[in-house]
Image (spheres, coloured by chain):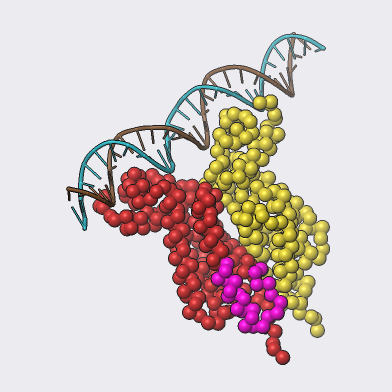
Chain colours: A yellow, B red, C cyan, D brown
DNA sequence: TAATTAATAGTGAGCGTTAACTAACAATAG
DNA sequence: CTATTGTTAGTTAACGCTCACTATTAATTA
């Protein structure tokens, strides 16, 4: 195979690894198969990654780009309700564009294998939770809602997004995730506690 | 090892298989390890199950008992709000008692491996969705709520339960799932659309 | 600028290990 | 006595990973 520098080759390897996981699950990701898909030898894989765990770490690092982009886009908005809307919609549009990523997120086995990967995934989840918490808090204070358990609301929304994506996967991507997401956003608005008008 | 009839032995095998999956994930479930835990030879496993897939099928069949019990208990209640409360609480109490089952539910890889297992799991999910749908519908009509997307509400609740259980797992079972569940139930009541009083 | 060197990216062969599963045969319960 | 439940000792295939080695590129020196 034609030589490529490590940065380029690493990109290809991670890319193909995601594709394999998406196609047949994490357990189907073998170095042999991966090498074959990248069209280099097995041994060459180890020129660019320490071990298999290191490759998965590469996938997760790529996934961190999601959060960066999400946070940037959210920061541009000012209305907290718009922020919430965008937070949800961003998940659906991103995942519809990067289908293969959904399999990584849902693969428990990946994170069971290694403590490092588990920690990495937990920190990603934590960050996202924090971001959503801030948004919902802003909605609460701006709309003068007195009674609202922000933390629970965050869990509800994240669970909602997660289950919709899971159902999308189980349906073999039979519907538009973005359209489905818009329906979900509308529904979330209906369960938001109503504004308590000031005196 | 002392001889046991197939029915008894099958029970033991399925039981230990669940334990192994719970301890280290589905990928750690090997026939060798399983045989060792059951204290019979590898070959003996194949006296009682056709193949590995057949063993997982045994686990899922066991899990169907969950739905049976749930439906029975729900049927005893009459107030739909009580039914919803019990529907949620049952999940948390059952899963706290059968910790190992949670790993099976969340293991995508199990269902990626086999079309049969995938179908089985999908039918379990579908049934539960149907049960919850009926409960929420009853709440809607009984409380004369005009505006309420029942289907979306069902997804919200199932996603909520699922994420709470997942967080419980990720925390290494650091908190009481039942207590956490009670908090969730309280919160769900607050997001229920308010009763529209009749004229 | 051309030749030499050092670093990098590739190779095939094969290591030790483990996987699911099977054949042939032995013990035991009804 | 016969069904069934168990055993030991294998099978083939795949796993992650390493070894000794070669080809290509980039940097350095003559």
Secondary structure character of the magenta stretch overall: helix
Residue B74 painted magenta: no
**Going 53% across and 51% down the picture, which residue do you hit?**
B115
Q: Which residues are magenta?
A: B129-152
Q: Nearer the viewer, residue D10 or A88?
A: D10
Residue B136 painted magenta: yes
Residue B135 higher or lower than B10, as above or below? below
Q: Mark yes or no: residue B169 visible.
A: no
Q: Nearer the viewer, residue A84 or A169?
A: A169
**Going 69% across and 87% down the picture, which residue do you hit?**
B197
Q: Quadrant of the C terminus of chain A?
A: bottom right
Taking A126 as reference, is B47 left or right?
left
The number of discs equals 0
Residue A22 higher or lower than B184, as above or below? above
**Going 44% across and 65% down the picture, which residue do you hit?**
B65
In the picture, residue B136 is in which quadrant? bottom right
């Amino acid at each position: 195979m034609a030589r490529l520098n490590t940065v380029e080759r690493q990109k290809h390897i991670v890319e193909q690894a995601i594709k394999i996981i998406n196609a047949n699950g994490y357990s189907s990701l073998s170095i042999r198969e991966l090498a074959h898909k990248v069209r280099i030898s097995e041994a060459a894989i180890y020129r660019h990654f320490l071990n298999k765990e290191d490759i998965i770490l590469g996938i997760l690092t790529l996934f961190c780009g999601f959060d960066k982009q999400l946070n940037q886009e959210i920061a541009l908005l000012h209305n907290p309700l718009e922020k919430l809307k965008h937070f949800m919609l961003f998940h659906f549009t991103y995942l519809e564009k990067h289908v293969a990523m959904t399999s990584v997120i849902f693969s428990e086995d990946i994170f069971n294998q290694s403590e490092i990967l588990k920690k990495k995934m937990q920190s990603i989840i934590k960050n996202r939770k924090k971001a959503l918490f801030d948004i919902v808090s802003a909605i609460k204070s701006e709309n003068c809602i007195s009674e609202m358990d922000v933390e629970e609301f965050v869990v509800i929304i994240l669970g909602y997004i997660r289950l919709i994506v899971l159902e999308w996967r189980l349906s073999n991507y039979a519907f538009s995730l973005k359209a489905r997401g818009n329906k979900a956003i509308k529904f979330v608005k209906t369960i938001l506690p109503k504004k308590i008008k000031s005196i």
